[in-house]
Image: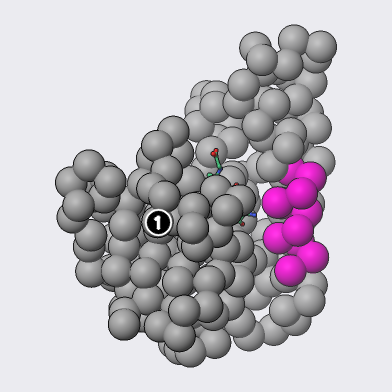
């Protein structure tokens, strides 16, 4: 059986998983979902109800985006995204997932968290932006002059951050980060994983991916 992959186009975790699957050319069957109407078939595989979810040919289930990335790249890593110090990369990705992401959600939905202002939440996000900018002063990408796992895992979240207030981001003191984000967002690979698919639950149409 071809691995079965549940995805949601706009989810940054699903984006990073799609990017790794596409780069590694692992063939999966993609079922597009929407978060407010999750298929029971997906919830039976993973009751926590988050995307992405990947069911492997042997029946095993991966329901963490990073595990899906590493699974795909361990099978085929043509651009050496796993090269370098994987532990340091995972540590930075964890900062993204467990610190930055929380502030990003508050910045995005500041009206739902009226105890602080939007600019307060943005300032909290900036701690992470500063760390990325410092890395990008040294190399073109976060860990080297080439794209690595950490770049792919993190940029979908910085893209979300930049979209909250585009004008602010464009004039912010993070020129290397802006350049890095642009190069990843404008890449062929990113465009290829942002194609729109019909929702599987209503259309019953799954897609060959990539
Ligand atoms: N730690 C998970 C997080 C995945 C996650 O939170 N995905 C969001 C969508 S971006 C989700 O499915 N949320 C469930 C919901 O909103 O119902 C991973 O890395 O895969």
Q: Which residues are magenta?
A: 90-100
Residue that appears at 37% across and 69% down: 4
Counting other residues with Cα less than 10 Å from the Cα at mark 1, is it few (<14), some (14-19), or many (20 or more)? Answer: few
Residue beneath disc 1: 41
Q: Quadrant of residue 191?
A: bottom left
Residue 74 x, y percent position in the rendering = 54, 87
Residue that appears at 78% across and 54% down: 95
Residue that appears at 60% across and 62% down: 64
Coloring scheme used: one colour
Secondary structure of residue under mark 1: helix
Residue 63 x, y percent position in the rendering = 57, 63
Who is closer to the viewer here, 155 or 27?
A: 27
Is 199 located above or below residue 86 in the figure? above
Residue 37 x, y percent position in the rendering = 40, 37
Q: Magenta span has 140?
A: no
Residue 120 x, y percent position in the rendering = 79, 21
Task: Give the quadrant of the N terminus.
Answer: bottom left
Q: Is residue 48 left or right of residue 187?
A: right
Who is closer to the viewer here, 173 or 30?
A: 30
């Amino acid at each position: 059986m071809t691995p079965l992959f549940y995805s949601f186009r706009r989810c940054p975790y699903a984006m990073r998983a799609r990017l790794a699957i596409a780069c590694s050319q692992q063939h999966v069957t993609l079922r597009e979902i929407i978060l407010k109407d999750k298929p029971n078939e997906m919830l039976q595989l993973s009751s926590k109800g988050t995307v992405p979810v990947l069911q492997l040919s042997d029946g095993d289930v991966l329901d963490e985006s990073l595990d899906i990335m590493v699974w795909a790249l361990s099978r085929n890593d043509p651009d050496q995204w796993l090269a370098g110090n994987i532990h340091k990369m995972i540590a930075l990705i964890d900062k993204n997932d467990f610190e930055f992401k929380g502030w990003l959600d508050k910045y995005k939905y500041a009206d739902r968290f009226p105890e602080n202002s939007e600019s307060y939440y943005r300032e909290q996000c900036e701690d992470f932006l500063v760390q990325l900018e410092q890395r990008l002063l040294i190399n073109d990408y976060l860990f080297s002059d080439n794209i690595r796992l950490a770049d792919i895992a993190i940029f979908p979240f910085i893209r979300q951050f930049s979209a909250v207030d585009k004008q602010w981001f464009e004039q912010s003191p993070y020129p290397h980060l802006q350049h890095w984000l642009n190069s990843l967002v404008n890449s062929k690979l990113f465009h290829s994983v942002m194609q729109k698919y019909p929702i599987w639950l209503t259309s019953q149409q799954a897609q060959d991916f990539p």
